[in-house]
Image: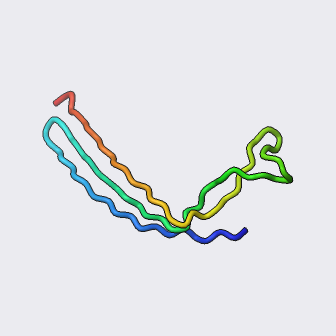
Amino acid sequence: ENLSPEKAFTNEGGYKRVADKFTFSLFAFNTRLKNQIVRVKAQYNGEGFIDGEKVYKKENLAKSNIYGIESELGFKLNK
């Protein structure tokens, strides 16, 4: 089975503050994917396991979305 190449479009934005005694940052991201390649359970010769290991194959997802936030907080303990 032939896989199509993945295509992605990502947006990211955030805020960072640096002060004398602390640092703080907060960022958000959103990635829209087309043809994301994922692993799915499969069978080989009618079996779902080979030598005790699960069988997987790779497939394309038509569309998917990955999003999240990232934050950081730091304090300066000495001068």
Residue at the outermost left position: 20
Coloring basis for residues: rainbow
The residue that appears at 50% across and 70% down in the rendered structure is: 7
On screen, 13 above or below 24?
A: below
Residue 20: quadrant of the picture: top left
Left or right of 58 on screen, residue 17: left
Numbered label tally: 0
- Residue 60 drawn at (x, y percent): 60, 64
The residue that appears at 73% across and 68% down in the rendered structure is: 1
Residue at the outermost top position: 77
Quarter of the image for the C terminus: give it: top left
- Residue 3 drawn at (x, y percent): 65, 69
- Residue 51 drawn at (x, y percent): 83, 40
The residue that appears at 21% across and 41% down in the rendered structure is: 23
On screen, 24 above or below 4?
A: above
The residue that appears at 18% across and 47% down in the rendered structure is: 17
